[in-house]
Amino acid sequence: MTMTALPRHVLLGLLAILVVLIVLPMFADRFYVQLVTRIMVLAIFAMSLDLLIGYAGLVSFGHAAFFGLAGYALAILQRDVELVSMWTTLPLSLAACALAALVIGWFSIRTSGIYFIMITLAFAQMLYFFFNDSRSFGGSDGIFLYQAPTLELFGTEILDLGRRGELYYFVLGALVASYALARMILQSPFGRVVTAIKINEPRTRALGYNTRRYKLVIFVIAGVLAGFAGYLNALQFGIVNPAQLSWHQSGQVLVIVILGGIGTLYGPVLGAFVLVLLEDFLSHLTEHWLLIIGFFVIAVVLLLPRGIASLLEFRPSRQPVGGEAEVTVQEVRRA
Amino acid sequence: MSGKLHHPGRRRFLKGVAAGFGAAATASFVPTRFAIGQQAKIKLGLLLPYSGTYASLGHNITDGLKLRLQEAGGRLGGREVEIIQLDSEANPAKAPANTNKLIAGEKVDFLIGPVHSGVAMAMAKIVREEGTIMINPNAGADAVTGPMCAPNIFRTSFSNWQPCYPMGKVMMENGHKRVVTMSWKYAAGQEMLDAFADGFKAAGGTIVKELYVPFPDVEFQAQLTEIASLKPDAVFVFFSGGGAIKYMKDYAAAGLKDSIPLYGPGFLTDGTLEAAGAAGEGLFTTLHYADDLDNELNKKFRAAFKNATKRDADVFAVQGYDTGTLLLQGVNAVKGDVTAKKEIIAAMERAEIDSPRGKFTMSKAHNPIQDIYLRKSVNGVNKFVRVAAKAVEDPAKGCRMA
Amino acid sequence: MSFYLIQALNAVQYGLLLFLVASGLTLIFGIMGVINLAHGSFYMIGAYLAYWLHLETGNLLLAVVIGLPLAVLLGLAVERLAIGFLYARDHLYQVLLTYGLILIFNELQRILWGNDPHGVPVPDALAGSVPLTETQSYPVYRLFISAACIAVAAGMYAVIHKTRLGMTIRAGAANREMVQVLGIDIGRLFAIVFSLGAALAAFSGMLSVPVSSVYPGMGEHVLIISFVVVVIGGIGSILGAFVGAMLIGFADTFGKVLVPEFASIAVYALMAAILLWRPQGLFGSRTA
């Protein structure tokens, strides 16, 4: 199921959401425009983690490392190298994430399961303390960005990202593009091998694939996509701090992905919307709002076995998560 | 004054109705916005930690502020006040979004918060762009009234520099020439140790070693052994909350308390003495407040706070209370017209705050110019010993207004 | 006593404490395959129970004696009402569920006991200290904690290697399916193991109250470090948890002394290095 095209009603549901997102700024309060911008950034971040968890079976507990690193790269490039254009800062920030993901991934994919979870956490914690402890990078208080990166083409500014409306559509475009890119990657022969590794690594290896290399490449791709989200986050708020790469942040995005539904790409997007909107709503209502979030999370686990995304699927038969395995392996063989 | 948490949707609707009446009722020569303002409540947005490690600070600041507003009849400049509380979770990663929620979502007239310095930096960044007046009732990051200073940013608490610099002279006077300093490795800790080192070196002392523990680690044993082997004349240490309690207990249990005196900024012993027990007795600390300050307002304030909350007031409650006083002086000066920001700021700049900590004024960087007291912890109370330094003004390094 | 010898003592003492916290985690992990993020919450609950019962009874020993069964009951309730439904499903859902539990337990702590930190004095019988150098002495209570940790370690060793329950647990850690085939009631085993793990975490919280006091958020401080210990040692291995805890104790203590600039990353660097050398931890037998 994962590899084939989306079921029609899911596709329609997603298109409906997209339409709502497109028209939202025309009637919503500017606060909601800001809020939804933030959610969409978080959604890209969550989607990047779903590439790892849902498709490659690599559960990273240090994914915020790349999210935070890209923000820091942008802040440092602006402050110390005085680069202002997005044409330079974005590629350089993403390159920094790719490099970091290459190094961390190269070490981490030697382990698996819970050990993989913990080694990714270890690397993220080291990066966290690096920024937290280093005074030249702002220490625990972080660094400010005094202006949004400029986006010019042939000398004329095409978008002013300091303006909320333009930033909103830029981020919406980024979300759609990220989703499309992730789908393309997964439907390519490369993506099929990656998915096959999750289902049965020894068998995939026996078919002659260098599974480690495939895992490393998907790890780097996910790291770069997380970095893209981190870059947008820093751009939106104009501040980076170590909390953005703390284990709390890694944990939060992990929760969003599982809550939304792993292995669907759109599930994590829904997860981001539901969790953040719920937080926004509840934090007004009562001082003990986290209690309600806690019960909500548990209710989803117990009542929606495949996450919020399963609400979109309307499927009467609830087969266990492993059920799709055989189909995909056969598809890989065909590929 | 309503301090309850409301559902935003309903309130927004009610405000819309009020605005409709306001516009209809006033003649055209009165600026419409002002007219609406007279009808509506003044909104205070509080971004403070109400959960997690810093929750008690958030609550005491809030209750101090509410107490001050209650004393003033629940009104600012003749208008009723509405308080919107938002849990910051002391999380800098969520701080920009939370700040936006109050400014853009709730459209508050004043932003009050936070406790945590990392959150303060994010808030300061946003209000510099939005122009909302922000009153910081705690976070001590030097930069808030340093490089980040702005006309619309005020602080009613302290800069990290303030309580620490004067301690250098105090410790030299007590005959401690060689001192080891220790803190968590994060911005507030580093700023405090630096300020102390500056004051201590200026008074002729020597820092033997600076020890840092990763934040928020509370395993101190390795460094305590190091202190024991270095045998300094005294130790200057900054920790707060649970970390401070554990540190005082470990320090005493290691047998160091009697041989090597322990000093620190007042946060070490504020709100922690009950839990620390005997380990917290007899410590000298410097702060802009002492529990038993001998002035009428302090006595009245402490009794009222205890009466209202059943808890003892502390320095954080005082800071919340003074935030209320500063607001009153600013908004009363314009009779409740919160659109007159320039006038409010001017009134707040020249405010003389009658505080339980003693009178203080605002520096050009909008930080209190205040006395720093030497206190000694006796029977669980931070007792006033003497004034360590009079009218201490933060150097406000990097602030263009100073 | 020389400086480094005392530091070694500090390291051992810290390591023992870490072992106590982590032992319950490795049990739950190894036998049930459950990644229990709420482990730190049980530590916190133990600490608050000890504080509260001490307040009521005035006696820490009594507080522990009453508090431990409460912790076991709480563990049992969590297993029966929540985690028990998830054994057939992917581990990730256990992560999500126990994350929800953290939020709930944190709020319940605030509702029941408030936000202020509270201390519990060291019991009189253990209040003294042993002089080590002319300036430093070692508190008897810390030595007592170490002794208690060693006793728990020995007790666990005895249970696991000498009793029928232990045999089942060992078999379960090695091969879960096999245990089921042998006709052992796996549901009952899991309930016992989970309550035992929760009780161990709560017990370490209770023991540490006189040293560290109680405060909101205290559980999260021990969560990550416990996971590090378990993973270094190899999941499900009690011996591994013991060795892992000792290694972390030494890395942390001597990291702070010898390379203070890098003290914050010392334990994580150690973990990464060990996992690169042995991807299944020091004493891990299988992939989890």
Image (cartoon, helix red, strand yellow):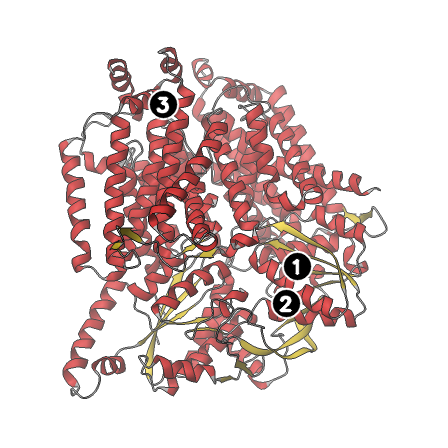
Q: Which residue is drawn at 41% across and 49% down?
A: A74
Quadrant for residue B315, please give it.
Answer: bottom right
Crowd tier of the residue under label 1, counting other residues whose Cα lies within 10 Å: few below 14, some 14–19, many 20 or above: many
- What's the amino acid at mark 1? Ala
Q: Residue at x 51, y 42 (%)?
A: A127
Is disc 3 on the same chain as disc 1?
A: no
Crowd tier of the residue under label 3, counting other residues whose Cα lies within 10 Å: few below 14, some 14–19, many 20 or above: some
* Residue B312 in view, yes or no: no
User: What residue does disc 3 label?
Assistant: A198
Question: Can you give x and y, in whole percent of width and height, for residue A207 in the image?
Answer: 35, 11
Element under disc 2: helix
- What's the amino acid at mark 2? Gly
Q: Which mark is residue B276?
A: 1
Left or right of A89 in this view: C32? right
Q: In which quarter of the image is the C terminus of chain A?
A: top left
User: What residue does disc 2 label?
Assistant: B266
